[in-house]
Image (cartoon, grey):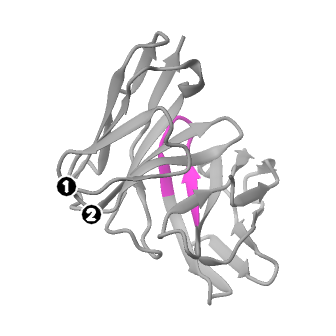
Amino acid sequence: SQQGEEDPQALSIQEGENATMNCSYKTSINNLQWYRQNSGRGLVHLILIRSNEREKHSGRLRVTLDTSKKSSSLLITASRAADTASYFCATDAAGTASKLTFGTGTRLQVTL
Amino acid sequence: NAGVTQTPKFQVLKTGQSMTLQCAQDMNHNSMYWYRQDPGMGLRLIYYSASEGTTDKGEVPNGYNVSRLNKREFSLRLESAAPSQTSVYFCASSPRLSAYNEQFFGPGTRLTVL
């Protein structure tokens, strides 16, 4: 069963705009990670946020975590065409022996 | 460093045929994983190996077997392929089975079972 559900399923924006995607999950977690997948490629790790953290930054990425609402958001600022990809959240649920459970992903299209 | 490599990149099988997907990592990682990715489903864990010599079932293990040949290599075998196993298969590795490790993914194998 999917632990994480991303919203929206698809997002189309213009270069320079900000992109926000959300992830909701069902059970208590140790951490939440975001991954990017370019078309036809494997996943690449972007950022990890621990359950006791509320916000984390990495370059143009900003991740927030609200454990009371069991949700996270990924913000990509000043998007570029190269950001076009699918984005997945992955949770490490408490009691699952540190196995990741991935969401269904958000497809981001950034147009010039 | 090649990271995580997978072979083959593409494969077409007939129902009932068998095959082995190969995965190797050169990062000296202890833990390795096999996932399948289906449209609209995200990634689902098939099997994982916390360390050399151990393997455990994931969310969708039926129809698959695995072998952790050594620390570098982790193979996935389909004994009798079925159309429901048509998918993209990803191998991944991490330094160890820990809540705070990122996973490193291979490029995937696209498998079609007719």
Q: Is residue A98 visible?
A: yes
Q: Amino acid at mark 1?
A: Lys
- Please report the residue visible at 69 percent of the width from the left and 60 percent of the height from the top: A3
Residue annotated with mark 2: B30
- Determine the chain carrying the residue at label 2: B
Q: Which residues are magenta?
A: A33-44
Spatial CA span between label 2 and label 1:
7 Å
Task: Estimate the x, y position of residue B107 in percent, counting from the top left.
Answer: 41, 40
Q: Residues within 10 Å of mark 2 (few under 14, many from 20)?
A: some
Q: Earlier in the sequence, mark 2 or mark 1?
A: 2
Q: Are marks 2 and 1 in contact (CB under 8 Å)?
A: yes
Q: Which mark is residue B84?
A: none
- Please report the residue visible at 34 percent of the width from the left and 22 percent of the height from the top: B19
Identity of the residue furthest to the left in this view: B70
Magenta run includes residue A38: yes
Q: Amino acid at mark 2?
A: Asn
- Please report the residue visible at 82 percent of the width from the left and 78 percent of the height from the top: A69
Task: Estimate the x, y position of residue B32 in percent, counting from the top left.
Answer: 34, 54
Rendered view: A107 above or below B77: below
Horizontally, residue B80 falls left or right of residue A49, namely: left
- Please report the residue visible at 38 percent of the width from the left and 24 percent of the height from the top: B79
Q: Is residue A84 visible?
A: no
Secondary structure of the residue carrying numbered label 1 = loop
